[in-house]
Image (tube, rainbow, N blue to C red):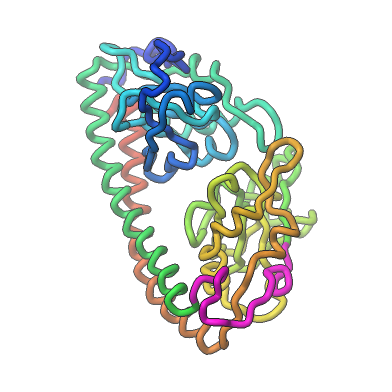
Amino acid sequence: MSASVAMSTLAKAAQINPPLNAKLPLDEPVCFVPMAAVSAETARVESSTTRPYSEVSKGYTPFLSGDILFAKITPCFENGKIAQALLPLHQGFGSTEFHVIRPVPGVSDGRYLHHFLRLEHVRSEGQRRMTGSGGQRRVPANYLTELAIPLPPLPEQRRIAAILDQADTLRTQRRAALAHLDSLTQSLFLDMFGDPVINPKGWPVVSLTDICHGYSGGTPSKANNAFWEGPVPWFSAKDMKAADLFDSEDHIAETVPTTTTLKLLPKDTVAIVVRGMILAHTFPVCVLRVPATINQDLKALIPRQPIDAQFLAACLRSQSGFVLEQVSEAGHGTKRLDSQGLQKIRVLQPEPSLQQTFATRVQAIEALKTQHRAALAAQDALFASLQQRAFAGTL
């Protein structure tokens, strides 16, 4: 693509939040896509259900197969929940927290638009333009309508999209391998110790709050730019995407933990999400594999007695369904896991020798994961380079 390619705006290349074209028969089957069905990692709609139009005609966002779903609410937007909805049925409905972007026939290609909207600068600028407060911040529609986009002829858009699709497929396959290894750890835990909620093997059980002290993080002063200039990872809900975390999107200065109440957590601290809309559908549990800090939406679990971090994390993940049942809703609508909910979470206490056997087996799995992470990092770098070149006109 020539670097002199014509620029346009997204509003000229696509319809933004188009209305339902015509009222459907009440018994018409349609696809339903909740926010949880959109994967930030694969940038795909991973699943959908079929419902009659009568069930979704009010209170949901209409779209068509081929439209792009763009999460507008925090933290889903920051996490990168953007996907082209390739559905088994023509008509779909989903969360009201989606912006819908529909390619204009003969003008734009859906895959091309999808890859453009995943650019880092689109996300960072969208985050800057968000309105609202707390867990209710959203990307406004006018940000999308005004967004400048290079718009070469359709054949060139499709060529670019095909190259990026191929590179992205390699990353998806690598992530699938890592996810399999994560599930292997969970399978190993269940095989050795059983479901903590049912406790079929009769292990001694304690409350999470009895065995761990929960430390809540915080946010450095927005007014002090020096706080945000440094190498120390500062994890928030948008980072909680993997079982093990090695780096965060945001970083703070090394002086912050010594000059504020924010605590520098040691390596191998288990962290959980306790506030945010992400708790509507998933309970992230991660092991911080580097010394780090956390924000106020997370809680670090500081053991009151020796317990292996990987064992604790696996025990918590194994009862995620039960934990989500304990999630309540704050007055302004944000989901939260309060102290009463944390107290109901169970931690098994098998013999220390069994915990050590589990930890040793997990180490072998971790060695394989390290190899896959290195390969994925190289593939991510390649994809980012191709993405930048594609939309700079040099691919």
Q: In which quarter of the image is residue 28?
A: top left
Q: Which residue is drawn at 56% across and 54% down?
A: 283
Taking the view exactly as shown, the residue that stands out farthest to the front is 27
Q: Quadrant of residue 83?
A: top left
User: Where's the C terminus, which quadrant?
Assistant: top left
Residue 160 spot, x, y in % from top left: 25, 29
Residue 133 spot, x, y in % from top left: 71, 32
Please report the bounds of the magenta region as a residue range: 194-214
Task: Using the image, determine if residue 297 lies above or below residue 290.
Answer: above
> Residue 79 magenta-drawn?
no
Task: Please indicate whether residue 251 sits to the left or right of residue 244 in the image.
Answer: right
Residue 50 spot, x, y in % from top left: 38, 34
Residue 302 spot, x, y in % from top left: 69, 69
Q: Which residue is drawn at 72% across and 76% down?
A: 304
Task: Please indicate whether residue 294 sits to the left or right of residue 315 in the image.
Answer: right
Number of labels in the image equals 0
Q: Which residue is at the front of the view, 289 or 227?
A: 289
Q: Which residue is at the front of the view, 232 or 356?
A: 356
